[in-house]
Amino acid sequence: MKNNLVVVRTTNPGRLADFYQLMGWSFEYHRHGKGPFHYSTEKDGWVFEIYPAKKATLESHSVQLGFELKGMDRFLEAGVELGGVLLRSPHMTDYGIQAIIKDPDGRKLIVKEEGTYQEVGQIALTKTNLVRGKGIELLGNSIHGEAEVGDFLEFQIDKQSYLTRITELKPETPSSTPTIGRMRIRALKQDYQTIHSWNPSSSFATIFRIK
């Protein structure tokens, strides 16, 4: 058996289509015969449709959807701007890198970063700095492995796990101690203040790479 159709209903189809379009989908606005106009998209034989509802119901809160896509962190940022509510920031699970967000109607989505991942390094973080309008900058010394722009960095603050993408990497001057240098990371806006208030003498972080 294969699922090939998902239909959701909403009192604001246009707003919801704008939200799900952030996943890279292209919606058509059409109708079947004398049926209602609605938004529809298809990929690999799987159809997702957004139909109008006459009034809001509690049904949206009992539906949970799951999607896998590339650039999960960028989708989350843009999704919150369009009315989504972030329930849990990106984190590592047995199934890969995931986050949880509600769409503008309140449906819970489990979003997974597409691809397989592997640990490629570990570092000791020594300093954090909030870069206004650009995110977080970290400084750390390499323990083993390597780091590249696009890799994910996982670390903990007050027992809360954070997982963010490295967006810029500036290696320090080579020395006898392997150095990662300054890293600009893509942290969700909701996480900025918490991360900025954290300035440890040293804390381990793990680097993951998606393939």
Image: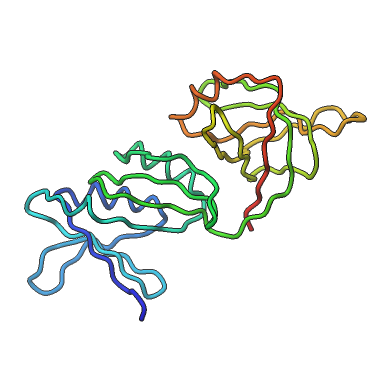
Q: Quadrant of the C terminus?
A: bottom right
Q: Decide: is 204 above or below 21.
A: above
Q: How many marks?
A: 0
Indicate the position of residue 153 as horizontal and vertical percent values: 63, 40
**Residue at 18% of width from left, 61% of height from top?**
38
User: Residue furthest toward the front?
Assistant: 159
Q: Quadrant of the N terminus?
A: bottom left
Image quarter of residue 177: top right
Indicate the position of residue 107 as horizontal and vertical percent values: 27, 50
Image quarter of residue 30: bottom left
Q: What kind of colouring is applied to the model shown?
A: rainbow
**Residue at 33% of width from left, 38% of height from top?**
85
**108 lies left or right of 182:** left
Q: Decide: is 3 above or below 81.
A: below
Indicate the position of residue 62 as horizontal and vertical percent values: 23, 54
Near-viewer residue (66 or 80) = 66
User: Residue furthest toward the right?
Assistant: 176
**Residue at 50% of width from left, 26% of height from top?**
192
Image quarter of residue 169: top right
Indicate the position of residue 119 as horizontal and vertical percent values: 69, 50
**Residue at 23% of width from left, 64% of height from top?**
7
Near-viewer residue (101 or 11) = 101
Near-viewer residue (163 or 169) = 163
